[in-house]
Amino acid sequence: MPNKATALKDVADDETSTLGDKLSDTASKVKDKVAEMGQTAAAKIDDNRGGAAEGLEKAATALHENAQGLPGGEKVSDLAHVTAEKLNSTAEYVREHDVKSMMTDVESLVRKNPGPPFLQPSRSAS
């Protein structure tokens, strides 16, 4: 006949096992829910890529059209045109790449340029 200590240990082991199973199930459900939310967010972003690209193109057009009238002379005008071209390039990129491919590009960029130097302006911008 088992003693009380053995019986208590068996009960504790059963409770620990049950608690572990419950935690594992909960973690799995949370993981699934987070993945579902991520997919929903990505789908919404993908649905709005066309509108975002169009907005970028409109901003680029406005910059091109108004560059000559900006105060600051030729340098500012040239900078406005360069910025407008960058906006057009960004619009094209947004239109042609879904969220998954954009995330892959960001991961690659960060991997190639880790840490604070990634945040510093490029030397060619002078």
Image (cartoon, rainbow, N blue to C red):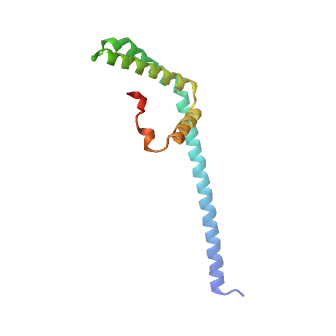
Classify residue 68 by image quadrant: top left
The tally of labels here is 0
Classify residue 124 by image quadrant: top left
Q: Residue at x 42, y 39 (%)?
A: 119
Query: Foreground residue, 1 or 40?
Result: 40
Query: Foreground residue, 27 or 82?
Result: 82
Classify residue 118 by image quadrant: top left
Quarter holding the C terminus?
A: top left
Q: Residue at x 59, y 42 (%)?
A: 36
Viewer can see residue 17: yes
Quarter holding the N terminus?
A: bottom right
Query: Foreground residue, 55 or 107?
Result: 107
Q: Position of residue 63 (x, y in %)?
A: 38, 16
In the picture as drawn, the residue positioned furthest to the left comes out as 71
Q: Residue at x 56, y 38 (%)?
A: 108
Q: Position of residue 41 (x, y in %)?
A: 53, 37
Q: Is residue 79 left or right of residue 43?
A: left
In the picture as drawn, the residue positioned furthest to the right comes out as 1
